[in-house]
Amino acid sequence: MQKKIVLADSDIPRFYYNLMADLPFSASPPLHPGTREPISPDDLSAIFPMALIEQEASPQQEIPIPEEVLEVYKIYRPTPLIRATALEKSLKTPARIYYKHEGTSPVGSHKPNTAIAQAYYNHLEGTKRLVTETGAGQWGTALAFACQKFDMECKVFMVRCSFDQKPYRKIMMQLYGAEILPSPSLTTEAGRQALKKDSDTPGSLGIAISEAIEEAIGRKDAKYALGSVLNHVLLHQTVIGQETAAQLQSVGEKPDVIIGCHGGGSNFAGIAFPFIRDKINGADLDIIAVEPLSCPTLTKGNLDYDFGDTAGTTPLMRMYTLGHDFIPPNIHAGGLRYHGSSPLVSLLLEKDLIRAEAVPQLDVFRSAVLFTKTEGVIPAPESAHAIEMAVREAIKAREEGQEKVIVFNLSGHGHLDMQAYQEYLQGNMTAEDAGEGPDLSFGVAC
């Protein structure tokens, strides 16, 4: 039995896989926030380089990965696929559980897969400064790392509750040379309006996105970079699933269940999209997106056109959404506190190619501690949502007496999330799931 499945540098994927080329149905176009007409490439050129705009709507199935990007990937890719034998034994399950360990990257998460690519394409077009937002800090750290590789400045608006909860993420970004501000801040109109509305707001990714876009548009040498949701971001993450498929094949395994945590959609898409193609072609696969019960975008959101940010400056996207004004509870999985979902992930859910599950915070941390004790890896709170679902599926396999191959994406380690684990171990963590839930009475008529 092979515990760790490791590929060679030569096995790093040479192409990004574009799921849109294989979908048997069409995706709805993003709409201009002013005219409500389908948006044009020129409309997006103020915030994105043309190479990424072209990838956003490309019909090409395989998009070559530039050699300069591959050279940076070689620092940490391919990442290992590991069989969780100790977890299996603890659960007394006949299931075989594998996890793709993206926490082995320099910044500790899957986020550099797209950060490196975005920094490269911006560098080619002469961008000097990238501006972004970050929830838990993983994306901001990844972009700061990538900007250093291509000699660019980086400015990050970090959601205030995570800014307070995760001080060492701020230090990591500063070590990579980035400037970090808590969001909402007083430096942008969007931030000032949010603080005027609620001076004690924990912030949200929607607010932070508004601030980052406002900052980027205000400088000719700057562009905006997004760590999730958009098609080109999900495209870059497919190196995860491509490697996973090759690693499983090398040991003669075929997956029955594919699991990824879900906030905006980037790490879920990374592990799932290459397997969606198999499902379209008839494979019997259960593909699960797992989200917090306190921010139930896919499980309780409306499928509607909505803004990606709070101020309403982004294109309107057809997606499952809790409303762009929704402020999620102050849970520790900051990277999953987003009101909307990727339009592509939303489309897959609408067409029943995937399913979505929402899980409570206390259950998530219970499974995270079990995983730490059995496998020795401390997971990020975001990744622990996938672990919780893998545990549920493994117990289900035990109860049904079925052998299954369960694969999940461990999207990042939790070495900088000790405050969250301390609260859990001391019994001070709240469920953050009680109450009436989000107000879904919004609507964006188009």
Image (cartoon, helix red, strand yellow):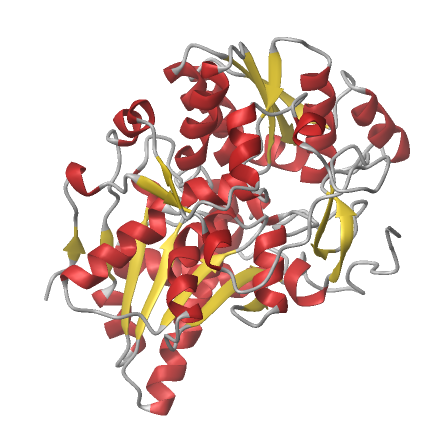
Report the residue at 46% width, 15% height from top.
123
Residue 374 lies left or right of residue 204; in this view the side is: left
Q: Nearer the viewer, residue 249 or 26?
A: 26
Residue 67 lies left or right of residue 165; in this view the side is: left
Residue 249 lies left or right of residue 179; in this view the side is: left
Q: Nearer the viewer, residue 69 or 29?
A: 29
Point out residue 304 in the picture as x, y percentages from the top left corner: 77, 57
Q: Eyeballing the image, is 326 above or below 3?
A: above
Residue 400 lies left or right of residue 95; in this view the side is: right
**Can I make out residue 428 in this image?**
no
Point out residue 317 in the picture as x, y percentages from the top left corner: 71, 47
Q: Eyeballing the image, is 315 above or below 361?
A: above
Q: Nearer the viewer, residue 321 or 169?
A: 321
| Count of numbered marks | 0
Point out residue 224 in the picture as x, y percentages from the top left corner: 61, 24
Name the image quarter holding residue 307. Answer: top right
Report the residue at 89% width, 52% height from top.
445
**Can I make out residue 288 in this image?**
yes
| Residue at the extreme bottom | 400
Q: Image quadrant for the N terminus?
A: bottom left
Q: Which of 288 and 182 is in front in this view?
A: 288
Point out residue 251 in the picture as x, y percentages from the top left corner: 14, 64
| Residue at the extreme front | 59
Q: Eyeballing the image, is 184 above or below 437?
A: above
Report the residue at 38% width, 55% height from top.
409
